[in-house]
Amino acid sequence: MVSDTPSFIGRNLALTLAVAAFFFGLPSVLSSLLTFAYRERAAYLVGGGDAEPLSVAVYVGFLLFAGLLGALPGFLGHAVLSGAVMDGGNGRRPSIGSNVGAAFRRAASVLGIGFTIYLVWFFAQQAMIGAELLFPSFGGGVAFVLLIVPSIVWALSAVAAIPVAMREGLGAMASMARSRALTKGYRWPIFGLFLIVLALMFLMRVAMAFGVRFAANAVPSASVLIIGTIPSFIDSAIVWTVASIAMTTAYVELRRVKEGTGVDELAEIFS
């Protein structure tokens, strides 16, 4: 599925670049710039300073807001690409206007799915951080087993939710339930797919870290903040794009395998 992605991108380059820039890259940069102002506060809290509970709650709330600012447009972009991939499977040439319009018509379901997924993952992460601070010797490991692992398993069951919402017109919770039924029995292969995406993300971040370090030494200090947002832009644009196309093709393939529908869709999409 990941290997077929370049074929789709090559035939729909303008659409893919527009979605990657405006729905994935730019929101990620805005989120990064918002959280930059809180770096000192974050270092103080993580360092175990005597922070008041209210200030910690405000800080966590701010992180949630900044994260949603970057994530929710990404889920809308995922919906745009899902519609485009399935349009190709129906023999229609995807267009930016029609696919963006379709995504916004399903925005309530798409954003409901995105908000639910992000909220579960965010609070699992924050609970793990809190456990590490309260119980440094074992809290992180226990929280990882009790919270992070179940969250990953649950997220894998929801990978087809947005394609379901776009193709079948279901609401947020119904789309997630439908995704859970479709992915049952196939979550290990889906996990393998996401390991590939994570490996791609890791390699990109390593390469960009070296690039940013070199660029930061070569430009005035006032430009360092702007340069520092470039990895976030590129990382989000590429990873969201690959994952969105892969999840949509997974949905089509799962329907083919489990229900016998969409037999010719993948061949048409990537022909």
Image: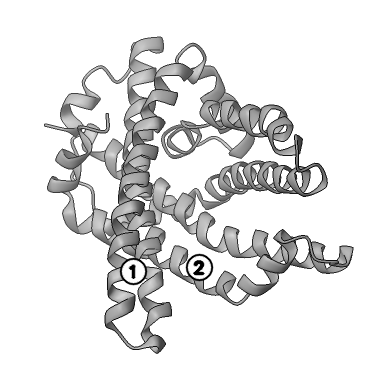
Q: Which residue is farthest front?
A: 137
Looking at the rendered structure, the kind of residue marked 1 is Arg
Mark 1 and mark 2: span between their CA atoms? 17 Å
Task: Give the residue displayed 40% in from the left and 11% down from the top.
Answer: 259
Task: Give the residue displayed 40% in from the left and 88% down from the top.
Answer: 222
Image quarter where the C terminus lies is top left
Looking at the rendered structure, the kind of residue marked 2 is Ser
Give the left or right position of residue 10, taking residue 229 as reference. Answer: left
Residue 81 visible here: no
Give the left or right position of residue 252, taking residue 157 as reference. Answer: left
Which element type, helix, strand or loop, lies under badge 2? helix
- Residue under pointer 1: 213
In this rendering, is residue 248 above or below 34?
above
Q: Looking at the picture, how far across and down is residue 131, in whole percent?
A: 77, 43
Q: Looking at the picture, how far across and down is residue 110, in whole percent?
A: 52, 46
Residue 236 visible here: yes
Q: Looking at the picture, how far across and down is residue 168, in whole percent?
A: 46, 32
Instruction: Give residue 32's mark.
Output: 2
Count of picture labels:
2
Q: Front-most of 75 and 62? A: 62
Q: Front-most of 43 and 110? A: 43
Dots 1 and 2: beta carbons under 8 Å? no
Quadrant of the rendered image containing residue 15: bottom left
Nearer-N-terminus badge (1/2) = 2
Quadrant of the rendered image containing residue 199: top left
In this rendering, is residue 121 above or below 30?
above
Nearer the camera: disc 1 or disc 2: 1
Task: Give the residue displayed 44% in from the left and 68% down from the top.
Answer: 29
CA neighbours of label 2 inside 10 A, class few (<14), some (14 to 19), many (20+): many
